[in-house]
Image (tube, helix red, strand yellow):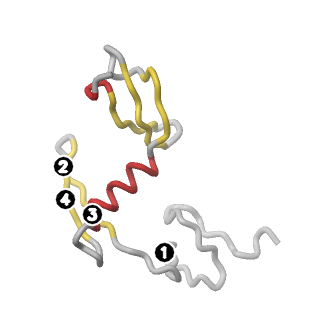
Amino acid sequence: MKLENIKIGHSPLTDSIFLYRHGRDAGIALEKRDAEADVVSALVSHMMHGHPSGAKKQVTINGKKYQIKVTPVKESECIHPNCTCDDYCMGDDPYSTPTRKDAGA
């Protein structure tokens, strides 16, 4: 197996990152597996190396510029905007709607 036949992709349908092996057509996966945890872990490790308080990096992809910022989050710090953590969960998705802690009770 050649490394040229292995790629990392994103599925808009499942919104997941995966590692896949392809044949002649790079758009068709012969085998694939979820790789989101691996990708994010490698990115955080790369960005935090030598920068314990965090780091920013600018990248250009297909002519568009993006800024990636990685900072440590304190255990008691909630990532939901405007959350006091008195009424809302400690969810790990900042784009989700915070849920009241007692919502399921």
Query: Relative to residue 5, is residue 75 drawn left or right?
Result: right
Of residues 66 and 29, the one drawn nearer to the viewer in this rendering? 29
Of residues 44 and 69, the one drawn nearer to the viewer in this rendering? 44
Marks 4/2 in contact by CB < 8 Å: the verdict is: yes
Q: Amino acid at mark 1?
A: Pro
* Residue beneath disc 2: 60
Report the Cα–Cα distance between label 3 and label 1.
Answer: 23 Å
Q: Quadrant of residue 5?
A: top left
* Residue beneath disc 4: 58
Of residues 42 and 56, the one drawn nearer to the viewer in this rendering? 42
Local crowd at mark 1 within 10 Å, few (<14), some, or many (≥20)?
A: few
Q: Amino acid at mark 4?
A: Gln
Report the Cα–Cα distance between label 3 and label 2.
Answer: 16 Å
Report the Cα–Cα distance between label 1 and label 2.
Answer: 28 Å
Q: Quadrant of the C terminus?
A: bottom right
Residue at 39% over, 54% down? 40
**Mark 1 / mark 2, whichever is N-terminal:** 2
* Residue beneath disc 1: 81
Q: Secondary structure at mark 4?
A: strand
